[in-house]
Image (tube, grey):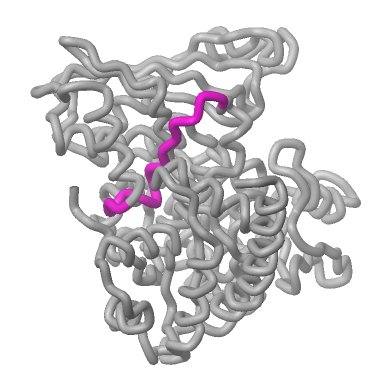
């Protein structure tokens, strides 16, 4: 392609992306339809961000997604009066091309038949959500909920924290607005000191100051049947977490850490085990969420006999910035200067979601001086081995492209990616295909994961399941 033609093509693509923006916004606002490209949401994105997402598609599909094709699909979808749905337009176009159909509208009508003409038929009120704690995970959960608030069935109503100063509310608003890792909040934030609320993108969030999770009257703020998401990490067993259920207006509680005496859920793997009677549920850990979907694919395809999981994990807030006393081994040494070997229960915790792997995995962790994005190295002995690296990578890439785990597993085969390239990834884990190793006795798979944002995305998916607000996903996943 000549330089002139390349520029003309770019200008045309810009125009197509510009035309997509109102269609994407209207589908989200009026139909509760979330549009994405391989897990990358297109809601409230700029022209350049939309075009970058189209370019990224080649990492999964091996070819770049043409913006003109996306625009055609979105124009048709906007005319179908769709009910709530989640749409991956890259996977959708991939499936349409494979169908060899020449009638895009007819094919889309058939593909979306269960939601065509269903606009506005779901009158179920939004699920009230309360965040108990407003640290790293709490603020990212807030960002995700606020990002999709116009088309979401999950309503962020309140945040519970301890009051630390006379200007506590302004401090909390500032931390929501600015983030050293994830960047600026995409929207507007203002503080209403009189009502003790932060209003973000038009959504009022009630801040409640309390230290006892069992003694809050949420109904006084118009909140009822809420799911409380406890991201403090203070209470990790069923009995202590059940304190939340004693407060007026609370129906269920979700823990953002591994839990004892409750179901540990890795969305996409065992979220179908959540029942109405499960009033206290754990979303497991970030590492467990990153490795379990990949392990499920490998176990289903080849059978896992034994394995070791080594986690290279960004430092966390429970470590010391400089050497000082810490009750945990080695964690008292400076997190900013050292690699720190520490224990992890993530490998053993996999069996809570995949019972067939009980006793088959060991694990360790190395905390490293980076603020976010970690890596899990899966060294596995399999019942049967893939013929070569290409066969194994094909299985993992297909899982990322069209399996029921495609929201959990992402895939890359770039020669240049490093950890910061995965900041903001919504996948539970991203397989690095170039790093895959197949030997005569074992396989080694490298999985990147944003231990903050990717995990928070998984927590939101558990919330959707607990509240019964899951929406149909298109195109329909395929079993591998």
Q: Is residue 189 rendered to the left or right of residue 108?
A: right
Bounds of the magenta segment: 402-416
User: In front: 78, or 72?
Assistant: 72
| Whether residue 247 is situated above or below residue 178 in the rendered picture | below
User: Between residues 130 and 307, which one lies in front from this camera angle?
Assistant: 307
Q: Position of residue 75 (x, y in %)?
A: 52, 80
Residue lying farthest to the left in this orientation = 383
Q: Main secondary structure of the magenta part?
A: loop
Where is residue 181 shown, x and y percent of the image? 71, 37
Residue 449, position as x, y percentages in the image: 49, 34
- Residue placed most toward the observer, 53 or 125: 53
| 47 relative position to 108: left or right | right
Residue for point 56% across, 25% down: 416
Would you say residue 239 is visible in this rendering?
Answer: no
Query: Residue at left 41%, top 38%?
Result: 411
Residue sitting at 35 percent across and 59 percent down?
94
Tell me where residue 385 sits by quadrant.
top left
Q: Quadrant of residue 331?
A: top right
Could you tell me if residue 232 is visible in this image?
Answer: yes
Q: Is residue 166 left or right of residue 9?
A: right
Magenta span includes 415: yes
């Amino acid at each position: 392609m000549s330089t002139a033609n390349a520029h003309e093509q770019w200008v045309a693509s810009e125009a197509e992306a510009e035309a997509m923006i109102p269609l994407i916004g209207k589908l989200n606002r009026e139909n509760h339809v979330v549009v994405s490209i391989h897990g990358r949401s297109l809601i409230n994105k700029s022209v350049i961000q939309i075009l970058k997402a189209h370019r990224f598609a080649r990492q999964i599909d091996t070819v770049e997604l043409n913006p003109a094709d996306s625009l055609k699909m979105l124009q048709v979808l906007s005319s179908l009066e769709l009910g709530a749905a989640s749409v991956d337009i890259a996977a959708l176009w991939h499936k349409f091309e494979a169908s060899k159909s020449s009638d895009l509208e007819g094919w889309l009508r058939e593909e979306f038949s269960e939601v065509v003409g269903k606009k506005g038929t779901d009158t179920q009120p939004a699920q009230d959500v309360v965040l108990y704690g407003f640290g790293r995970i709490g603020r990212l959960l807030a960002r995700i909920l606020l990002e999709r608030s116009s088309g979401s069935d999950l309503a962020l109503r309140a945040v519970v924290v301890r009051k630390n100063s006379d200007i506590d509310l302004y401090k909390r608003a500032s931390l929501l607005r600015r983030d050293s890792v994830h960047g600026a909040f995409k929207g507007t934030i203002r503080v209403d000191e009189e009502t003790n609320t932060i209003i973000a993108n038009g959504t009022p969030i009630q801040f409640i100051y309390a230290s006892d999770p069992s003694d809050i009257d949420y109904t006084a703020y118009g909140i009822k049947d809420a799911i409380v998401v406890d991201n403090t990490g203070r209470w990790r067993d069923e009995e202590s977490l059940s304190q939340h259920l004693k407060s007026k207006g609370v129906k269920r509680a979700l823990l953002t850490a591994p839990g004892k005496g409750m179901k540990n859920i890795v969305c996409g793997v065992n979220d179908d085990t959540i029942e109405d009677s499960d009033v206290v549920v754990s979303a497991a850990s970030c590492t467990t969420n990153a490795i379990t979907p990949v392990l499920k694919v490998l176990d289903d395809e080849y059978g896992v006999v034994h394995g070791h999981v080594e986690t290279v994990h960004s430092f966390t807030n429970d470590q010391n910035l400089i050497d000082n006393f810490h009750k945990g081994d080695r964690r008292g040494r400076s997190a900013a200067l050292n690699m720190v070997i520490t224990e992890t229960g993530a490998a053993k915790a996999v069996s809570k979601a995949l019972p067939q792997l009980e006793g088959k995995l060991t694990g360790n962790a190395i905390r490293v001086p980076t603020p976010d994005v970690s890596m899990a190295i899966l060294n596995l002995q399999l019942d049967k081995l893939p013929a070569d690296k290409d066969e194994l990578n094909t299985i993992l890439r297909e899982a990322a492209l069209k399996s029921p785990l495609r929201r959990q597993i992402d895939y890359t085969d770039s020669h240049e990616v490093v950890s910061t390239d995965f900041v903001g990834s919504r996948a539970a884990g991203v397989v690095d295909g170039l790093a895959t190793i197949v030997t005569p006795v074992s396989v080694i798979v490298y999985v990147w994961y944003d231990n903050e944002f990717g995990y928070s995305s998984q927590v939101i998916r558990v919330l959707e399941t607990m509240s019964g607000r899951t929406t149909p996903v298109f195109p329909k996943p395929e079993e591998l």
